Amino acid sequence: MSYFIFLYLFATLAIGVVASRKVKNTKDFILAGRSLPLSITTAALFATWFGSETILGASSQMALEGFPGVIQEPFGAALCLLLLGVFFATPLYKMNILTFGDFYRIRYGRIMEVLAGIFLVLSYLGWIAAQMVAMGIILNTIIGMEIQTGIYLSAGIVVFYTFLGGMWSVSITNFVQMIMIILGLAACLYEMNANRSLSDLIAESPAGTFNLLPPSGIVPSLNYLSAWMVLGLGSIPQQDLFQRVMAAKSAKIAVLASLIAAFLYLTVAMMPLFLALYAKELLPHILDSNPQMLIPYLVKGYTSPIVQICFFGAMTSAILSTASGAILAPSSILSENLFKYILPKKDWAEKRLLLLSRIAVLITATIGLLIAMGRQDIYELVEESSAISLVSLFTPLAFGLFSSKCTQVHAVLSLILGSTVWLIAIYLATSVNPILYGLVASTTPMLAGFIFPDQTESTKKKHLS
């Protein structure tokens, strides 16, 4: 089986190298020339998060807590894609910009661009680390490779084709990887169902396993709400999601791809969750010792070799697709909204900026690798990454996109206040999820700006127009 996995990894590299031939400038590198059709845009959006946190992280939470433990992922992720298609895709696409940092500069000013760029980059580091850890786990399961060695190997592969082809390599490999994910998970679930009826397993599950309703009590209800928000709202101001929307051929394709991806995400994500029910019954000792290994051990111990090849190919696909996008996104922010301003404008030639984007890929991946070597809880790494953008960037985006009343002062205060209150709440270990405190704090300056707009700023705008 290991030969097939390494063959797949080699094929992924080959696809990335071929796709890199389309890269001629930074627009090609960051947005694939804004020329992706519906099928590839959908695949790219679907593959945004469908990686380790879904197959390894969410499945372990499903085995431990049922649906109440996986509100954040996959349900919150599907909600994010739905909201993206309904409210955000069209106005963002029409702005014709390269990065989310550009949005904050155009709407609020240079100071907000820099601050938002820093927070955007920070929000991805844990995400990148989570994918590297997951790849190390998979290689350890398949061939017994040390997890740390697997982390180094996976990082090298993803960085190689992302460095060369940028969004073109990410998008084309995502399309192939989406097919592998669906086929691999379906084959595994089909074989498990042949030995033990899934319907019987569901019927025998403890009461509340499939409950999606909020719990009773104020604090549990607020924490339930926060679970929906972490990815549901927190991932909307994310560069990887933005890049996939902006890479589409048209705004119509961007909207339609977001809606289809939301449906696909929710339906395909049910497969690893149902597999977790089998693993819980067959491997209770793994559940007690290392829940993240439930699905890999289930597949390795209870399915045929051909299904194992399909599954681990799908698992590898999911991780690589998420990791490549997670590396490219902050790299784009670093190069376009931070590093570029270090250079004098006379040096902003396309070749130099393209090289800067590729150097940023190496820097981002290196930091993610260092985090991966120190922390290896996938679900927590992903949750923390999304929380950063929720408490600092979401409300300036929402107010800035749909209202012209708020200014840079409001946006900067929102970012600083939201992240500060969130960190204080974490330190105090509040019973209510700290992101709710952070979100309320972040919303307050923006709401004040909306209700009491800066008259001086409004007068300036009227004079300029």
Image (cartoon, helix red, strand yellow):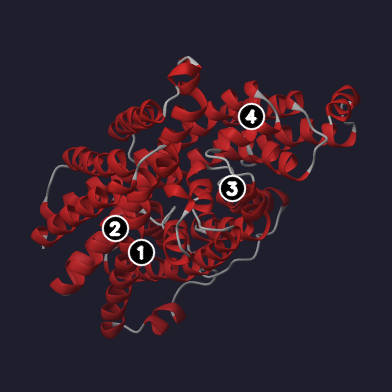
For label 2, the SS is helix
Amino acid on which disc 1 is placed: Met
Q: Is residue 244 left or right of residue 370?
A: right
The C terminus sits in image quarter: top right
Coordinates of residue 374 in the picture (x, y in percent): 31, 31
Whether residue 127 is visible: no
Q: Which residue is mark 3?
A: 236
Coordinates of residue 6 in the picture (x, y in percent): 13, 55
Amino acid on which disc 2 is placed: Ser
- Circle 3: is it few (<14), some (14-19), or many (20+) Cα within 10 Å? many
- C-alpha distance separating marks 4 and 3: 18 Å
- Going from N to C along the chain, the mark reached first, 1 or 3, is 1
Q: Is residue 175 left or right of residue 103?
A: left
Q: Which residue is mark 4?
A: 105
Q: Which residue is mark 1?
A: 178
The disc at residue 317 is 2
Above-or-below relation of 8 to 357: below
Give the total number of marks visible in the rendering: 4
- Going from N to C along the chain, the mark reached first, 1 or 4, is 4
* Dot 1 and dot 2 residues touching (CB under 8 Å): yes
- Going from N to C along the chain, the mark reached first, 4 or 2, is 4
- Circle 1: is it few (<14), some (14-19), or many (20+) Cα within 10 Å? many
- Going from N to C along the chain, the mark reached first, 1 or 2, is 1
- C-alpha distance separating marks 3 and 2: 23 Å
- Going from N to C along the chain, the mark reached first, 3 or 2, is 3
- C-alpha distance separating marks 1 and 4: 34 Å
* Dot 1 and dot 4 residues touching (CB under 8 Å): no
